Image (tube, rainbow, N blue to C red):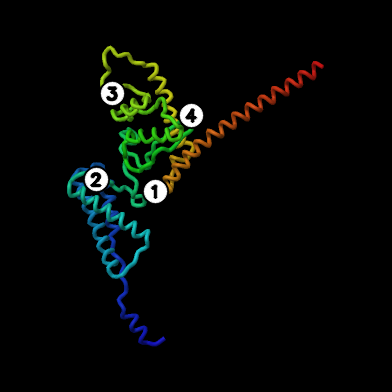
């Protein structure tokens, strides 16, 4: 190889590695987390430091992209997600707020949104939010979303889907109190559907209340809650490891499918036990008749 080639090679500028300051960012983060008391001033300063590190790295990446660097599709999506996270955090930092619309909480799953439930153990939950309907023991997935939506708005759609499937409107709907708003009550009254639950507002004087019927409706409505519990404990809905939006939705749908398969399995098992008992009883009768003869 000619000597001039090595001369040109050695004189070419080598590509320098980006200085990300990730160790410094990690050190500042741990310094803030390990403090027992977090004041507003400390939190504001810690967020400012982390945003400065992120802003510096994004500028360095933009310079590399301007010089002809090409990213893969997955890297481009991840970079866009990080840019959106930075813009959201900067908006909350500048406006001194703690909430923003469509807030991203996961870099690998940017479609997940925080859902405030108000529970003592888990005040905020993350993941898919879904509506199911239970008709004659069969579970159907009516709606699935990753946003914090109001379930009461889907009642009319579910009732119309039931009419298309069965050919008539249901006679009663055993739903949570959340579904008993004025729009749903007027809609059910129009089509002669009884929506379970107490009346809106304060109890009126002189108007009798069928507490026994309300108690029966509430006991039967627990079946839907049991379906959620069974899907989480036995059908894998609590242990979803998928990362993409489509795959997570498919896993949820498969969990509901397994619920119905368990019902078929229990029905076949009951039929087998019944036939086995009939076979044993017939065998005993044949043995008894042979002894008499």
Residue 58, placed above or below residue 41 = below
Determine the residue positioned at 62% across, 28% down.
Answer: 273
- The circle drawn on residue 245 is 1
Q: CA distance from mark 2 to mark 1?
A: 21 Å
Q: Position of residue 149 (x, y in %)?
A: 31, 39
- Give the SS element for disc 4: loop
Instruction: Decide: few, some or many residues near mark 2? Use Cα within 10 Å; few <14, some 14-19, many ≥20.
Output: few
Q: Nearer the viewer, mark 2 or mark 3?
A: 3
Q: Nearer the viewer, mark 4 or mark 2?
A: 4
- The circle drawn on residue 200 is 3
- Give the SS element for disc 1: helix
In primary-sequence order, the first of circles 4 and 3 is: 4
In primary-sequence order, the first of circles 2 and 1 is: 2
Please indicate whether residue 35 sits to the left or right of residue 213 in the image.
Answer: left
- The circle drawn on residue 136 is 4
Are discs 3 and 1 less than 8 Å apart at CB? no
Which residue occupies the foreground of this view, 42 or 34?
A: 42
Are discs 1 and 4 less than 8 Å apart at CB? no
Are discs 2 and 3 less than 8 Å apart at CB? no
Dividing the picture into quadrants, the one containing residue 21 is bottom left
Instruction: Decide: few, some or many residues near mark 3? Use Cα within 10 Å; few <14, some 14-19, many ≥20.
Output: few
Q: Nearer the viewer, mark 3 or mark 1?
A: 3
Q: Which residue is mark 2?
A: 100
- Give the SS element for disc 2: loop
Q: CA distance from mark 4 to mark 3?
A: 29 Å
């Amino acid at each position: 190889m000619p000597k001039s080639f090595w001369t040109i090679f050695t004189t070419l500028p080598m590509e320098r590695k980006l200085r990300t300051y990730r160790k410094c960012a990690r050190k500042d983060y741990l310094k803030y987390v390990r403090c027992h008391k977090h004041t507003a001033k400390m939190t504001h300063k810690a967020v400012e430091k982390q945003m400065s590190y992120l802003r510096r790295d994004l500028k360095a990446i933009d310079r590399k992209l301007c010089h002809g660097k090409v990213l893969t599709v997955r890297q481009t999506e991840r970079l866009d997600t990080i840019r959106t996270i930075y813009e959201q955090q900067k908006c909350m930092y500048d406006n001194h707020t703690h909430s923003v619309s469509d807030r991203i909480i996961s870099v690998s799953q940017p479609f997940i949104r925080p859902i405030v439930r108000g529970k003592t153990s888990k005040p905020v939950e993350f993941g898919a939010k879904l509506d199911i309907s239970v008709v004659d023991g069969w579970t159907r997935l009516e709606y699935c979303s990753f946003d914090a939506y109001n379930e009461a708005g889907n009642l009319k759609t579910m009732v119309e889907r039931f009419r298309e499937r069965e050919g008539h409107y249901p006679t009663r709907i055993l739903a949570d109190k959340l579904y008993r708003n004025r729009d749903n009550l007027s809609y059910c009254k129009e089509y002669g559907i009884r929506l379970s639950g107490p009346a809106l507002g304060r109890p009126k004087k002189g108007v009798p209340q069928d507490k026994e019927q309300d108690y029966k409706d509430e006991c039967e409505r627990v079946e839907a809650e049991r379906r959620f519990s069974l899907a989480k404990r036995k059908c894998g809905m609590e242990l979803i490891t998928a990362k993409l939006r489509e795959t997570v939705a498919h896993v949820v749908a498969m969990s509901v499918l397994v619920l119905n398969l368990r019902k078929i399995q229990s029905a076949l098992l009951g039929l087998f036990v019944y036939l086995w008992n009939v076979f044993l009883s017939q065998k005993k009768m044949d043995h008894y008749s042979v002894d008499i003869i």
